[in-house]
Image: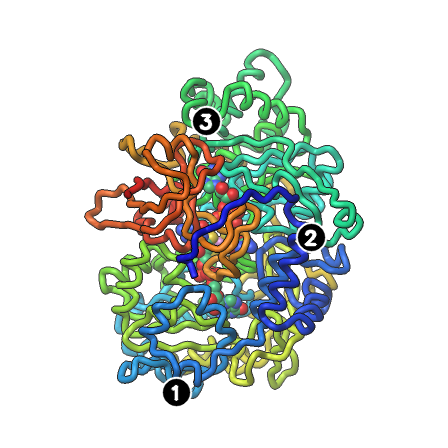
Amino acid sequence: MDDRKPRYHPYDHPAGGWGAAAATAKALMKQSVLVKGSRALLSMNQPGGFKCPSCAFPDACHRELLEFCEQGAKALAFEATRHRVTRDFFARHTVSALREQSDYWLEMQGRLTEPMRYDPGTDRYVPISWDDAFALIGRHLRRLENRRQAEFYTSGRTPNEVAFLWSVFVREYGTNNFPDCSNMCHEPTSRGLPPSIGVGKGTCRLEDFDKTEAIFIFGQNTGSNSPRMMTNLAQARKRGIPIISINPMPERAMIAYTAPQNIPQMITFGHYDIASGFLHVKAGGDLAVMKGMMKAILEREAAGEDVLDRAFIDEYTLGIDAVRADAMAQDWAEIVETSGISEEQIRQFADIYIRSNATMICYGMGLTQHQRGSELLQQLCNILFLRGNFGKPGAGIVPVRGHSNVQGDRTCGINDRPRQQMLDNYERVFGFPVPREDGHNVQKAVEAMMTGEARIFIGMGGNFVRAVPDTERSYQAMSQLDLTVGINTKLNRGHVIHGREALILPVISRSEVIQTEKGEQALTIEDMVAQVTASRGTLEPASPDCMAEAEIVCRIAMATLPDSRTPWTEFAQDYALIRDYIADVFPEIYADFNERLKAPDGFFLDVPPRQRVFPTDTGKANFLVLDGLHADVPVDDPQMLRLLTVRSQDQFNTTIYSTNDRYRGVWGNRMVLFMNPEDREARGLQQEQVVGLETICDDGHKRMVSGLTVLDYPLPRGAVAGYYPELNPLLPIEFVDTLSGTPAAKSIPVRVIT
Ligand SMILES: Nc1nc2c(c(=O)[nH]1)N[C@H]1C(S)=C(S)[C@@H](COP(=O)(O)OP(=O)(O)OC[C@H]3O[C@@H](n4cnc5c(=O)[nH]c(N)nc54)[C@H](O)[C@@H]3O)O[C@H]1N2
Ligand SMILES: Nc1nc2c(c(=O)[nH]1)N[C@H]1C(S)=C(S)[C@@H](COP(=O)(O)OP(=O)(O)OC[C@H]3O[C@@H](n4cnc5c(=O)[nH]c(N)nc54)[C@H](O)[C@@H]3O)O[C@H]1N2
Ligand SMILES: [Mo]
């Protein structure tokens, strides 16, 4: 369906509103679950119900009767679909034929219903019993002498209890190979923030939106990707709070937004203007903006103005002198050239920052997915330190997270570079010897597959092969493995790009009831403000042969480690017992887990910087210097454009809900290339001409994508944008953020080919 010509007409209605309400109903109808889905929506994010399976933004604890958004409703509709992938389906289609289908088509086939095994003789998936499937996995895993040859992926929808069991099993098996979707996402938050503030998490809660005096949003498309945050932004705007968006793409929802739950406003077609200011930054120009802001502030300090929070800086921080020297040494002309923002505008935004007594800085993939992504976040901390914006109401740093439990998975032990003290705790509680050396993250896992070192891949959720960089090379590497296992709700690319042996294991989803011998089980989720809440599904499982993820981990463990003394049988039945063990392994975080979970709204994990405690090596908040003005290594090529790979309004990562992107005005095709008209003309291209892109990289691999329709779009000169995952073939596996290994997916050097 992607060969349709895209239609392009700008969306001039406010984001949200009737468009979102209509899209919600349409998604429910498309999956034939209007009634069932609508009923399930009533228990989403309500006490006793289940947590939204979409993004990680917190719910306001039944603030509105209907606490969901268009994206949550779509995620639920696609999960609760009536459509089913059965053994007959697999009998009808060879895997080679399935490989030719689009991601959208695979997704639309519906929920997986029973375990399947790849049969090379017929090139089809055929049914296999659960027992045989686990035995097969156990055989393969036991055969590996070097346990580092197996890769155990986690996608961020995995709940705490399952992630914890996964972390126990994999360590008992003998490796820290934990490639995690977070390695492509907010790993810079986990690696970049600790040296600055001592924790790799955000420091704000929802109520801070009600107390803040200014909000800056760097590189995050709130309206499409965390729509529930729009309610908080709209309320802040109503109070007259400045909201500044820093983005190469003027995202629609930042300009005008109507809350879909706000019926009076929808009837009168009213809307809020969300952003009061917009910095149309060049791709990767954020560091120059940040340095410019610091320079503007520090120049005023030097002129004798009282613009800093001296008391905070003296008592809680170290290192301001080096940061001051670095910012002051930057040249305004270079700042303007690199950022694409005028000195006057930067000074104006610095002034907004100075006048606010409580500022929140939010950010998303527009910052993390750069070669110096982690360090960019440290610069945000520097800015916040200057005015004491930690540990007071309405102030702090807000990583806008992706998957609903990606933060919780890390807290519960999914970590390829674990601290030794955490490993000591595993050893103390479980009594098996724990591997001490670092394991593989996503980048290293893919590289190990490419060199042939890795032999087995097991994915707890997600769509690894489609989400990772360097598509062609990754597909090739994945196909050479001995065994690939996808533990999933839906059919995806990872099932049709598979190893010599392959299994598909279908799971009970977040919205469905998990019944064990011990009764109905609840799972828990930690959202992006570190609030831990219970999630209980209310729908019937998609098929009686779907299995709960926790039980799958236990059964894999039992099949692989016959002599294990870990209580796998009991864990599979009793999730409260799993929580007791979580409390034992992470006493400083999760003491009295089950007890605290009894509160109707769950509980918050401790985030020390909220109390102005900074558990860094120095015991202080650290101002940190990052040299220069560039978020990526400059490339010397006059034809070079920086490619940003972004999400559309109608997808959840590799799950494509439709080929439209309502807010950006694209309909019917995702193979588009957004380009500044002057860049287009400079290359002699026509509007809507079909072109290709080629990566500029000298590692000897050619990376190309063709069939892209050029669309004029208000991007700054030098940047082009298109959709993830279609453009992942252009992203070299080694093109990553230095500190965290996160692929620099927002700044790929490319040139246009015709
Ligand atoms: N509906 C929906 N919701 C989702 C997801 C989804 O796919 N669909 N995915 C979930 C996940 S896993 C995640 S991580 C989040 C992702 O949510 P976001 O962080 O919003 O991710 P993206 O859509 O990749 O793009 C981020 C924004 O960065 C901007 N950008 C690109 N390059 C730069 C740059 O150099 N500087 C600046 N300042 N901005 C830049 C882009 O224009 C875009 O607006 O959303 C989560 N929620
Ligand atoms: N170029 C480029 N690449 C990127 C990005 C980018 O912006 N640009 N973004 C990156 C980011 S931020 C992320 S997070 C990754 C996403 O990487 P992943 O998390 O691996 O990908 P998803 O598309 O979210 O995974 C979708 C699959 O999850 C399965 N699933 C859904 N719900 C459940 C469940 O409850 N249980 C189980 N077991 N399975 C379930 C379904 O089978 C579905 O097919 O992609 C990264 N890749
Ligand atoms: Mo993500």
Above or below: residue 598 compared with residue 6 = below
Which quadrant does the N terminus fall into? bottom left
Is residue 310 visible in the rendered structure shown here? no
* Label 3 Cα crowd, 10 Å radius (few <14 / some 14-19 / many 20+): many
Above or below: residue 527 compared with residue 504 = above
Q: Which residue is mark 3?
A: 340
What amino acid is found at the position of numbered circle 1 in the picture? Answer: Asp
Q: Position of residue 723 (x, y in %)?
A: 43, 50
Q: Which residue is mark 1?
A: 132
Q: Position of residue 673 (x, y in %)?
A: 41, 44
Q: Which residue is mark 2?
A: 18
Q: CA distance from mark 3 to mark 1?
A: 60 Å
Give the mark nearest the N terminus, 2 or 3: 2
What amino acid is found at the position of numbered circle 3 in the picture? Answer: Gly
Which SS class for mark 2? helix
Which residue is painted at 45% across and 68% down in the image? 105
